[in-house]
Amino acid sequence: MVPVPGQGEAWAGFKEHAFDGYNIGAPPYGYRADRIPHPAPGKAAQGRTKTRLAPDPVRAPVIAQIFAWRTVDRLAVRSIAALLNADPQRYPPPGQYGWQPSTVARILANPKYTGYMVYGRRRSQAGKRCRPVPQDAWLWSPQPAHPAIVTRATWDAAQATAASTPAAATRASPAPTPPPAGPTRCGP
């Protein structure tokens, strides 16, 4: 693959990896890692693997419910988090702190739930921290790379709902949120 001008070979390699349907990093909530032997025979002989996304049978329905509450019922992320926290057996939380509005907002903004791999949602430039990139500059895989949990139309509707919702309704609660478990990096 020829590198994207101005982006470097590493960026082009990550893009190719994503477009081939391999996930980079931890699977998003609702999916599980499906490890397969590395396609390069030498790396496969070393026991190396690549990861594709497969729906988690317990958590994928939670994702579908979150999107339904947002797009059909037009609930705010705080209300969705409260509904999820009210029934942790039915809606297992992603961590030990329960459902946070910020977690719900990140799920609703994640295009991987459409089955497509999307690369370049955040980029760093000239040593600055990773910054969000406008959606029209994202790079979408030409076809779905893994099973979708929601349709692209549903995901688009969730984005439209977020754009039309007052900021106070989507802002995280003032309660302290635990720090990330590890270093934060700029990813796809």
Image: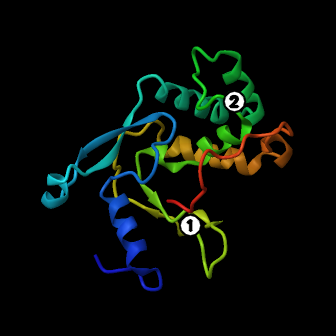
Decide: few, some or many residues near mark 1? Use Cα within 10 Å; few <14, some 14-19, many ≥20: few
Q: Is residue 14 left or right of residue 121?
A: left
Q: Residue at x 46, y 22 (%)?
A: 58
Quadrant of the snapshot with the N terminus: bottom left
Q: Kindly indicate the quadrant of the structure image that contains residue 155.
A: top right
Instruction: Tell me which numbered mark, 1 or 2, is placed earlier along the sequence.
Output: 2
Give the farthest residue toward the front.
Answer: 46
Of marks 1 and 2, the one in the foreground: 2
Q: Secondary structure at mark 1?
A: helix
Which residue bears the numbered disc 1?
A: 136
The answer to whether residue 76 shows anywhere in this view is no
Q: Could you tell whether 14 is left or right of 111 in the image?
A: left
Task: State left or right for residue 31 relative to residue 77.
Answer: left
Which residue corresponds to mark 2? 97
Question: Residue at left 54%, top 26%?
Answer: 62
Residue type of the residue flagged with mark 1: Asp
| Residue that appears at 78% across and 43% down | 170
Q: Label 2: few (<14), some or many (≥20) within 10 Å?
A: few
The residues bearing labels 1 and 2 have C-alpha atoms spaced at a distance of 34 Å
SS at badge 2: loop
Front residue of 169 and 152: 169
- Residue 39 in the image: above or below residue 175: below
